[in-house]
Amino acid sequence: MAKGATRRTRRAPRRWLLRLAALLVLFGLAFAAWLWWDMREWRPDPELYPEQGALVPAGTAPLRFETLKAIGARFVYLPLASGPAAEAPGGFPDRFAAARKAGLKVGVVLPFDPCLGADAQSGVFAQMVPRDAGLLPPAIALGSLADACDPKVSDAAVESELMTLINQIELHAGKPVILKLSPAFQSRHRTATALARDLWLARDRARPDYAGRPWLLWSANSARMTEASADPVEWVVVQK
């Protein structure tokens, strides 16, 4: 009897530990589910960031720019696409016109391809984007690295072509570009230190600090669900 009681006494703490672990797991899952649901529609406080807008996804999915403006967007950035998809109904030119018709300030984002030369990329920009002083400063999205380029491209060549591209885009637009800088690109090339341009950084919910200096634009929610589209948009705010 005494031995049986001793075994039961030893098992009791283990059962409580298992129950506690199970409760912690359930709490973690519940918190993750709440955070995911909350982030679907979350945006920074408009009192702190009165100027807010969106980077809409590329493609031709229906997007109601009037609705986007009604829910608090003052501006919109459109990713530049080229090829047949750009000319299809609902592609870049149609979205560009629709955004301006809705009364939104409009800017263009050119995704930088480290495997291509600057001339080819700036040529697409010059062909698709009009010279218009009313447009927002153009942005160059720095996310892709040259690791998959064939033939291989050195980091020095990437940085040289990027500087050439910046000069070409600025000459066409008549204003300085904004660098939409990813953590990976910054870690590889230290662009925030090397180039004196306004920065556009990204981090869901938390203010980004990976550039080591102040930013102008912050993508605060990478996938905000809105009534404007079935697809999420990247919600962006401006530093006061």
Image (cartoon, rainbow, N blue to C red):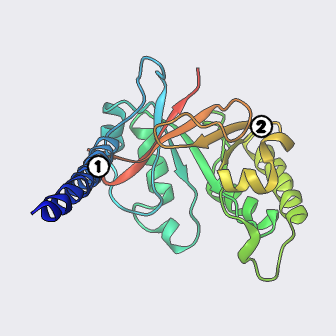
Amino acid, disc 1: Leu
State the residue at coordinates (37%, 30%).
72
| Dot placed on the residue nearer the N-terminal end, 1 or 2 | 1
In depth, the one of 202 and 228 nearer the eye is: 202
**Which image quadrant for residue 35?**
top left
Q: Is residue 160 visible?
A: yes
Quarter residue 38 falls in: top left
Residue holding disc 2? 197
Could you tell whether 55 is left or right of 171 in the image?
left
Residue type highlighted by circle 2: Arg
In the rendering, which numbered label is found on residue 155?
none
Residue 139 lies, in percent from the top left, at 66, 45
Residue closest to the far front? 2
**Where 235 sits versus 152, above or below?**
above
Q: Residues within 10 Å of mark 2 (few under 14, many from 20)?
A: some
Q: Which residue is mark 1?
A: 24
Would residue 115 be visible to someone looking at this image? no
